[in-house]
Amino acid sequence: MDNAALPADPEAISADAVRRLIDHAILKPELSRSDVDAQLDEAAAHRVFSVCVRPGDVLHAVERLQGTGVGVGTVIGFPHGTTSTAAKVAESLQALADGAFELDMVQDIGAAKSGDWERVERDVRAVVDAAGDTVVKVILETAYLTDDEIVAASRAAVAGGAAFVKTSTGFAGGGATAEHIRLMRQTVGADTGVKASGGVRGLDTLVEMVAAGADRIGTSASARILDEVAHRAQTGAASDRGDDTSSY
């Protein structure tokens, strides 16, 4: 898989290049339907690559975003990864039936912490097999893992057929770090994608994650980031808004 590199000169970064990186996250449990619609409309207005919505919102999101070019992905076994493999498979099949074009599944975190990598791999493989040609990303939840566990979890995800490894759900008290992205990239090589998610809420952080090896960015701050791209293009300087790492 080709790494989605950005120009080394921050002033040369284009809005289109940033848009192609972003899975706009609409995952907070307290969001109302009107909140979801506002976020879907924002994603469409900014023409991001995709949205990542709660499973129950997939069908609605597909209908609302029809014709916009914005894909609809969803999460599986979210946010704890503790549902059974059978439940993850059933959830995946329903999401696909509703129109999801990518699946972000949470690995069996308990199995990972137990060092049961065969179980982790089987869990991933079952979802990948159910998904067919659909892209499956495996959320490692790196905030809970040691570096050695991140390496082992990345390997298990690749062995299970995952197209991407992903850092975080955004709900574990820690998100993506450049160090973890570099470690994941070194582990999976060039043929597997790496997605940074959790705490990527400003352009500088997005650029740092891509430089470390991320191909995709999960964020709910798409508008903020793209506003910063425009500000930098106009002024040659970073926005003074900075990052807000308090949420997804």
Image (cartoon, rainbow, N blue to C red):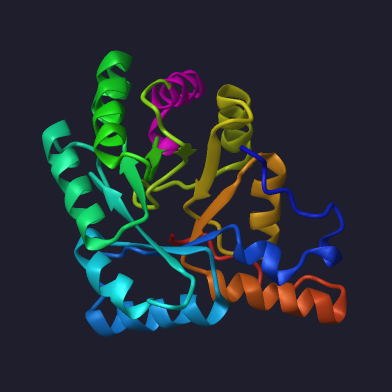
Whether residue 115 is visible, yes or no, is no
Q: Residue at x 38, y 76 (%)?
A: 65
- Identify the image quadrant of the N terminus: top right
Say whether residue 220 is magenta: no
Say whether residue 157 is magenta: yes
Image coordinates of residue 178 in percent, x first then y, are: 63, 41
Write the start and end of the magenta stretch as one range: 141-158
Whether residue 21 is visible, yes or no, is yes
Side of 139 relative to 48 (left or right): left
Decide which of 125, 167 is in the foreground and name it: 125
Image coordinates of residue 93 in percent, x first then y, are: 19, 47
Q: Residue at x 53, y 47 (%)?
A: 196
Image coordinates of residue 113 in percent, x first then y, are: 31, 22
Image coordinates of residue 246 in percent, x first then y, are: 47, 61
Q: Residue at x 69, y 62 (%)?
A: 17
Residue 174 to residue 10: above or below: above
> Taken as a whole, is the magenta stretch helix, strand or loop?
helix
Residue 16 to residue 171: above or below: below
Side of 22 relative to 53 (left or right): right
